[in-house]
């Protein structure tokens, strides 16, 4: 299957990772009256792209860098390990075998990958202020991991942090995209795209919006989505503690309130 087809497959809402069960915070925003029409939905989606979208895409791209040596022989990996991959160095281009997390050489073995992924997991946890959203991210990570293990069983999913709740969804996505042969920028694109399409689809169900108008809205956001993905892919060159930390406090508060509802249409 061509790389472009794999990108479409992973970005498809029908991919069996449970994304359809989440509104990305839209259900709470609708209930609070902050989103009630197409214009306010657009503002909501732009806000998600520039906060959760940027952070999630950057961490997915960084996880992709950790997994990029997968499938290489020791002889192929050695030159990449010996090179510096700092900003501006030819070995630091997106999608090259030298892509990794931390900027000091591609992880040479499972132990190094595990350490790098644990750092990313801890940093993403620190950037996710709401306990409800941390739980959602790990729940979605578990769902995505089940699909990934079935499709790409040789991917280094065993190097993910062995926490009872599972790893954060962007980290699983990064490893899955690397196993599929996608580039770092393509990985960030899948992540950024996913932060808006789920909420947009939920808008049709929650507000009764015309699905054609919602799709037109998404087409209009394509440039912003691509720009967010490009920014995230570039940021992945930085150490984990320097990755984007854009926050949305109102979304955090709304997520905690939403988690207390006895009746809700979406899990988040």
Image (tube, helix red, strand yellow):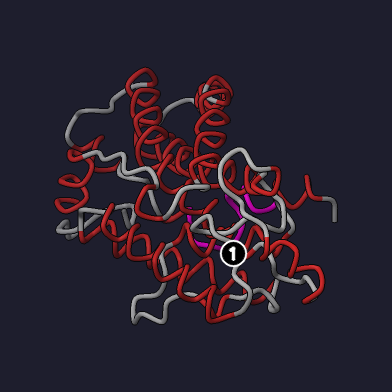
Mark 1: secondary structure: helix
Residue 31 versus residue 211 in the image, above or below: below
Nearer to us in this view, 192 or 70 = 70
Q: Which residues are magenta?
A: 8-19
Picture quarter with the N terminus = bottom right
Residue 59 versus residue 161 in the image, above or below: above
On the image, the x and y values in percent for residue 119 come to 39, 66
What residue lies at 31% left-to-right and 53% top-to-bottom? 268
What residue lies at 43% left-to-right and 27% top-to-bottom? 209
Tell me: 101 left or right of 162. right
Residue 141 versus residue 207 in the image, above or below: below
Tell which residue pokes out farthest to the right in this image.
1
Q: Quadrant of residue 146?
A: bottom right
Question: According to the image, label 1 marks what residue?
Answer: 175
Nearer to us in this view, 10 or 128 = 128
What residue lies at 43% left-to-right and 48% top-to-bottom? 56
On the image, the x and y values in percent for residue 52 come to 37, 43
Q: Quadrant of residue 229?
A: top right
What residue lies at 25% left-to-right and 35% top-to-bottom? 30
Tell me: 93 left or right of 119. right
Q: Is residue 46 magenta?
A: no
User: Circle 1: is it few (<14), some (14-19), or many (20+) Cα within 10 Å?
Assistant: many
* Number of numbered discs overlaid on the protein picture: 1
Nearer to us in this view, 123 or 199 = 123
On the image, the x and y values in percent for residue 21 come to 42, 56
Q: Is residue 9 magenta?
A: yes
């Amino acid at each position: 299957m061509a790389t472009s087809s794999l990108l479409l497959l992973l970005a498809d809402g029908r991919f069996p990772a449970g994304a359809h069960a989440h509104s990305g915070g839209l259900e709470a925003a609708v209930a609070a009256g902050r989103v009630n029409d197409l214009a306010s939905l657009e503002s909501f989606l732009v806000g998600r792209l520039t906060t959760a979208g940027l952070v999630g895409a950057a961490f997915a791209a960084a996880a992709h860098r950790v997994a990029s040596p997968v499938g290489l022989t020791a002889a192929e990996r050695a030159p990449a390990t010996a090179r510096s991959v700092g900003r501006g160095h030819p070995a630091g281009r997106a999608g090259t075998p030298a892509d990794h997390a931390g900027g000091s050489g591609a992880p040479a073995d499972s132990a190094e990958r595990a350490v790098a992924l644990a750092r990313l997991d801890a940093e993403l946890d620190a950037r996710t202020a709401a306990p409800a959203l941390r739980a959602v991210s790990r729940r979605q990570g578990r769902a995505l991991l089940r699909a990934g293990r079935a499709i790409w069983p040789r991917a280094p999913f065993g190097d993910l942090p062995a926490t009872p709740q599972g790893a954060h969804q962007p980290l699983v996505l990064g490893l899955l995209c690397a196993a599929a042969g996608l580039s770092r920028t393509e990985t960030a694109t899948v992540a950024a795209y996913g932060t808006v399409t789920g909420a947009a689809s939920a808008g049709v169900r929650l507000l009764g919006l015309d699905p054609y108008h919602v799709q037109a809205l998404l087409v209009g956001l394509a440039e912003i989505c691509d720009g967010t993905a490009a920014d995230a892919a570039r940021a992945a060159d930085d150490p984990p503690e320097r990755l984007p930390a854009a926050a949305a406090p109102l979304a955090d508060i709304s997520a905690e309130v939403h988690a207390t509802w006895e009746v809700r249409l979406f899990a988040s």
